[in-house]
Image (cartoon, grey):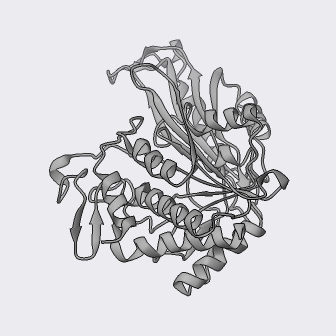
Amino acid sequence: MSDTLRLVEALIARDSVTPHDGGCQDLMAERLKAAGFECTTLSYGPADAPVTNLWAIKRGHGHATGSPTLVFAGHTDVVPTGPLEQWSSPPFVPTHREGMLYGRGAADMKTSLAAMVVASETFVAAHPKHAGSVAFLITSDEEGPSVDGTVKVCEWLQQQGERIDCCIVGEPTSVKSLGDMIKNGRRGSLSGKLRIQGVQGHIAYPHLARNPIHQSAPALAELVTIEWDQGNDHFPPTSWQMSNIHAGTGANNVIPGELVIDFNFRFSTESTPDALKARVHELLGRHGLEYTIDWVLGGRPFLTRPGSLIEALSGAIQQTTGLTTELSTTGGTSDGRFIAQICPQVVEFGPVNATIHKIDEHVAVDAIEPLKDIYLRTLERLLT
């Protein structure tokens, strides 16, 4: 059994349902300290459920002269298991079946974390006078609200005057086989809770009430059909989707007094949050609605164009797997959106993502060591 596989299994065995870390970061820090990394634990959030964050750095030869700092970023927290009886084996007991390793977090993202640690151990041992620095930014608040994790560590790093030049987030990005896709950006996320006010009344006397469902229907129909932008070479067009709509008192003879709609924009770099908000407000006002909106900006879009990081990572993928990787900005958000505010080159790369968040989450065992090799060869290309 490889050292990487042993570490993956040890991480999976730790129950770390968000926001709990389950001791994963202590295990990682123990190994990184032994490899010469300076480790700092940063805790934020409520006392009864604190978020644990790890910053670890190994400063190499020439660090102070401008050589790059490459950060491996990721999260130790995992999503809840779902019904335990539906799992073929216990989710926090790493289990092998037909060439697959099963367990919650196997793909998202404990395999990546283990591969990053072993790759870094191997690299600093083989290259004690490496250029630049190798660092880790690990949180237990990625699968949850994401308010006391990476975003807080990024603020702390700025306060410390710590510079980050390149970052690989270990999100599972591969589609069919390891190495076929790198995420070099993500769309922004802007959510809103829209409350449209009416006047409650008896359904038999509509002239004495004001039905917010009826009033809002033309505006909602228009919102659904708007072309917010056309996207660009890197991003698909911005989309607007309703995720929930609710009204009524539970009685079928009452006109409701309020309609509540949850919605979300996934937006490209062709749109800004302020511009999207302004268009929504203009439309709702034009339709004469009485309303309020509570807005939440989940993240701004980011894009890393081809440069030293993408060249090194794609070259390592080609060397290891023989694949010519694809660059993509599809999918949801990640903590890359926070890191991109302080780091000019941010990409995501990890194992196949077909089973993430699912019952019987798993990863191919024969992809674990190649993933470590890709991370190792990326380090060699950037820091030697």
Along the line of sight, the residue nearer the viewer: 295 or 306: 306
Residue at the left extreme, as displayed: 85
Q: Is 321 in front, or is 125?
A: 125
User: Vertically, is 5 above or below 90?
Assistant: below
Q: Report the number of numbered marks.
A: 0
Residue at (58%, 24%) from the top-left corner?
A: 196
Q: Residue at x 40, y 60 (%)?
A: 107
Q: Quadrant of the N terminus?
A: bottom left
Judge whether residue 246 can be spotted in this image.
yes
Q: In the displayed structure, does residue 218 sit left or right of residue 79?
A: right
Task: Please report the residue visible at 60 percent of the width from the left and 74 percent of the height from the top.
Answer: 377
Q: Is residue 171 above or below residue 384?
A: above
Is residue 203 in sight in this rendering?
no
User: Where is residue 34 shown, x and y percent of the image?
Assistant: 48, 51
Please tell me which residue lies in front, 215 or 348: 348
User: Relative to residue 64, is residue 128 drawn left or right?
Assistant: left
Compared with residue 33, is residue 331 higher up or lower down, i.e. above or below? below
Splitting the image into 4 quarters, where does residue 24 fall? top left
User: Residue 92's spot in the image, x, y percent?
Assistant: 25, 50
Residue 187's x, y, as percent? Answer: 66, 53
Quadrant housing residue 67: bottom right
- Left or right: residue 93 compared with residue 367: left
Q: Quadrant of the C terminus?
A: bottom right
